[in-house]
Image (tube, helix red, strand yellow):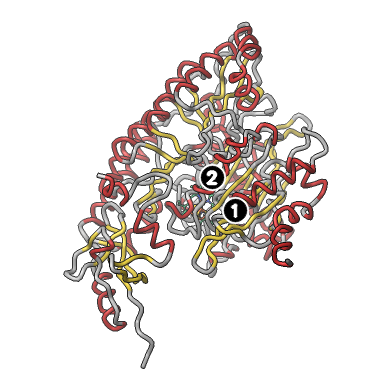
Amino acid sequence: MPPPYPPNVITANALINGDVVYQTRDDQWSETLAHAEIITDEAHAQIRLLDAQSQPEKVIGAYLAPIKTTPDGPVTTLFREYFRATGPSNYPHGKQESRHV
Amino acid sequence: MYKYTDFDAAFVANRNAQFRAQIARRIDGSLTEDEFKPLRLMNGLYLQLHAYMLRVAIPYGTLNAAQMRALADIADKYDKGYGHFTTRQNIQFNWPKLSDVADILDALARVEMHAIQTSGNTIRNVTADPFAGAAADEIADPRPIAELIRQWSTDHPEFQFLPRKFKFAVTGSPNDRAVTRAHDIGLRMITKNGQAGFEVIVGGGLGRTPVIGKTLRDFLPEADLLPYIEAIISTYNLLGRRDNKYKARIKITLQENGIDDFRARVEARFIDLHPTFEDVDQQILTTIKTAFAPPDFVQAPVTLYTEARTHDPVFRAWSDTNLSAHRADGYAIVTISLKAHGATPGDASSAKMRLIADLAEAYSDGEIRISPAQNIILPHVHKSTLPALHAALLRAGLATANIGLVSDIIACPGMDYCALATARSIPVAQAIATRFDTLEIEHDIGPLPLKISGCINACGHHHLGAIGILGLERAGVESYQITLGGDATETATIGTRAGRGFSADDILPAIERLIFAYLALRVEREETFLETYRRLDIAPFKTALYAQEEQTNAA
Ligand code: HEM
Ligand code: SF4
């Protein structure tokens, strides 16, 4: 058996405001990692990546990013992805801002 | 200050209209990102980690009050109420929306500013000594030369697609505050037998291959400048490598061809080009020079200043670190620190920008400069007004007395913003500044340039820090490498790697060990960190950094 395909999400930056977004199961783009479609199959991952990359009017630079699934939902495993999912550490800007309200 | 001519204004307006149309076509889907990217980069628009970033040029680091207010308005209206001043005297906005960028550029054009050639493989914003036109040690104001180069290089048809980015810096003083030896071309204004001219330094640069620039011509008469630099860049344009972007900078072209071969080609090209300029450049330079006439300096007593120094220890501490010698009697150059302990180096809120604009009008003939150390300078302040200026700065939290000290850190945006980063730099800067403030020893430590980059591209000049910190990624976590002995001045030196990197948790204690080792090693208070390092070399500092763990490992 091939090794199991590690869980991934598809992420990109939104065209207008550049914010980090995640592809959802129903072909939307969400600013929240928890809404992302979690992909665990390699062939499916390639198809979904092509879907994402064919939406230049919505997003820029779509790619697969590894995550870990937890009872609380997906969490990032790379620290770059952690910052993308959170926002900068010097001000409560970016995604942290909406979480504050 | 230089005022746009009708030609300049029409050129910028035209360019903005073009880019507005390009943005519209990107948004409606007629342009793909691959098609749009080079267009946006030509106009200073990057895509970063969380948002777009717009880099606006501040030519030779000079701003007037109206321009500073316009930057503040842009920060409020289109961004998150602040801007980030960079080591190349630019300002970056970290949160613009693509759909607002054309309006931002129009707002900039209204105050004669733009973002053209702040990115891409072109000739970038020309930087200059931030004390230009004010410094006591200056031979001549370098800004007319910088403006001449800007006019010649902006939209220069031959130089829009160079092998790689190309950066100029100009200084008119023997004490180099413009980092000329780390630029593709550095120009030092000098005189020889009473004639004005330049030492032309070529091939400096940082990044993954740090190189100190070499002298291509030890004396170039002033009138020969444009044909000579055109000869350099057209030689590089042909010879520079386009197959590998890590080998594309002029510093590598020089290494691969040898400086003598390169010089011979430049001199030959110069002979061809020289007659084609027909002195038009010199006529333009004469006109530009009138725009940089010094203000009318007044003669007035400075008793208020001397009294404040005697009676007010806070004022005295600030005036010890934040003032520099002015060429006019009774005047000082004031550096306003954007490095309050714990703040993000180089960031200024819109409120602070507006206050600085007001203070510039009240006390500095309306002039403001941005320094390559990411601070703000009021170049022409009469000493009698310093106590009032200081009081206003103090009320606004802008009177941090730390210029040149360990908390006056240069730091790039790093992983908090930058898409290319391998580690964060801002939190490291914040932690170091806060720690030495708490210890209350930074004035005792004395001058100590500390510089941090969040990746090998070295935007934070870490190679040139007496202490440099480079953030890398090792096995999925941040790892910080220390370099020692770097120098950004006229005695420019690339720092030496101290050894193994430190984790995010260990970097602050490591820096503390280094600095305490220096305090123990210096022969007298006046011996700076860099001087002690040069006297003793790296060994005792390595011991300070690594001995403790070697003992632990051996135990
Ligand atoms: C945030 C977006 C930025 C990006 C994408 C970026 C990208 C780069 C890259 C790729 C290089 C290496 C060039 C080479 O070696 O050929 C570089 C160098 C440099 N950047 Fe940045 N940078 C950014 C921000 C900054 C900032 C904020 C500053 C000032 C604080 C800055 C100042 C410099 C300087 C001084 C160099 C070294 C010049 C040299 O290599 O000769 N950059 N940058
Ligand atoms: S040094 Fe690296 S991390 Fe820092 S701004 Fe430059 S490219 Fe980004």
Q: Which residue: 49% across, 27% down?
A: B398
Q: Which residue: 53% across, 43% down?
A: B88
The relative height of residue B333 versus residue A35 in the rendered view (above or below) is above
What amino acid type should be assigned to the residue bearing mark 2?
Ala
Q: Nearer the viewer, residue A39 or B194?
A: A39
Could you say where residue B154 lies in the image, as x and y percent from the top left?
A: 46, 45
Residue placed furthest toward the bottom: A1
Disc 1 residue crowd, few under 14, some 14–19, many 20+, Cα 10 Å: many
Q: Name the side, left or right, on which B48 lies relative to B127.
A: left
Which subunit holds the residue at mark 2?
B
Q: Nearer the viewer, residue B136 or B272?
A: B136
Q: Which residue is mark 2?
A: B431
The relative height of residue A32 versus residue B105 in the rendered view (above or below) is below
Q: Quadrant of residue B74?
A: top left
Q: Name the side, left or right, on which B220 lies relative to B49.
A: right
Q: Quadrant of residue B380?
A: top right
Label 1 element class: helix
Label 2 element class: helix
Could you say where residue B360 lies in the image, as x and y percent from the top left?
A: 47, 21
Q: Which residue is mark 1?
A: B507
The relative height of residue B343 versus residue B308 in the rendered view (above or below) is below
Q: Nearer the viewer, residue B74 or B234?
A: B74
Q: CA distance from mark 1 to mark 2?
A: 10 Å
Q: Which residue: 36% across, 93% down?
A: A1
Q: Is residue B272 visible?
A: no
Disc 2 residue crowd, few under 14, some 14–19, many 20+, Cα 10 Å: some
Could you say where residue B550 lies in the image, as x and y percent from the top left?
A: 72, 63
Name the quarter where the C terminus of chain B is drawn: bottom right
Could you say where residue A19 lies in the image, as x and y percent from the top left?
A: 30, 55
- Callouts 1 and 2 close, C-beta under 8 Å: yes
Which subunit holds the residue at mark 1?
B
